[in-house]
Amino acid sequence: MKKLIILCVMLLLPMSANATKVGVLDMPVYCGHKIFKNKSCKSYWQPQFADTYLSHHGTAVASIIIKGSPNAELKTFDLFYHPYSPWTGYWIGDEVDSGGMTIEQSAIWFAKQLGVTVFNQSYGDPSGHIHQDMMNIWNANQDVLFVNAAGNNGKVVPTAAIGGNVILVGSVDKNNVRTPWSNIPGHANKYHWIMAPGVDVLAAAAFWPDGGYIHATGTSFSAPIVTGAVAELQDRYPQLRNNPAGTKNALLTTATDLGPKGVDATYGWGLLNLQKAILQMGVKTYNPP
């Protein structure tokens, strides 16, 4: 009974005063939205792409993260340019900046100088194919964790050499059943895979002047739920910030099993269960008096 009381208290412990810093690699984020009031949200962009619309997608992703971890410090980076509308833009992440790096590489490098320990990537090939340049980014930055949306084509993600610093995220509906359009891991990628809600997720949008809300659907909006969980877990256990593989293991191994028993080719480890991860970390780190 004493142990149970101690663990319950752990769930209520305040988060670290030095909050987890989260990199949001996305479309332009409206940090002026009321959901970010009294929160930390700062945007960075390349000067030549400054005359952009703020985007609904990027704003939604960032808002989902902050709902999952209200203490998180968001550092958002524009990898898409929206010259005409908040709804549609185009990829600029492969453009080379003045330092000789791509904008995507430069954003990650700079974010790490700011102390970012986890990056949300709600973008990629819609087919789920993980290209070599993405794997190169992951491999070159093994000191941080990447949470990557798995895509919405309803296909098996082709085999990829994924390391301990990457979590792939699929989508479930309100009944915790995989959405038919969510890509799946197959047997090759299932040990890097977790599920999170991806249908009608309430999120902020970039409506001027003080923002509005949308119901967002897609793995783009499942991934930031997991990223928010990472930030929350790293707030409570700051030692995980320097241990991306340990953070990944803490979340994946405590997921609620879905589908066939065990880690499977459709649901991977199963449904994100942050409370269980927090309790499990408490068991591992608690030193009795």
Image (spheres, rainbow, N blue to C red):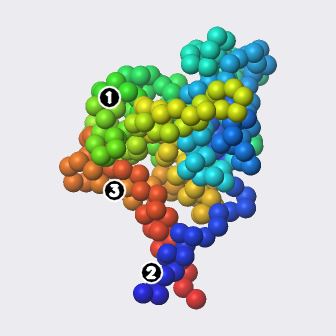
Query: Which amino acid is tagged 2?
Result: Leu
- Residue 58 visible in rendering: no
Q: Marks 2 and 1, how far apart in space?
A: 41 Å
Quadrant (top left, top right, bottom left, bottom right) of the C terminus: bottom right
Quadrant (top left, top right, bottom left, bottom right) of the N terminus: bottom left
Query: Which amino acid is tagged 3?
Result: Thr
Q: Are discs 2 and 1 less than 8 Å apart at CB?
A: no
Residue drawn at x 34%, y 24% is 153
Residue drawn at x 53%, y 45% is 227
Q: Is 215 displayed left or right of 22 in the figure?
A: left
What label does residue 256 carry, if any? Answer: 3
Residue drawn at x 30%, y 39% is 178
Q: Residues within 10 Å of mark 2 (few under 14, many from 20)?
A: few
Q: Marks 2 and 3, how far apart in space?
A: 20 Å
Q: Which residue is mark 2?
A: 4
The earlier-in-sequence mark between 2 and 3 is 2
Q: Is 259 displayed left or right of 145 in the figure?
A: left
The earlier-in-sequence mark between 2 and 1 is 2
Q: Is 220 displayed left or right of 58 in the figure?
A: left
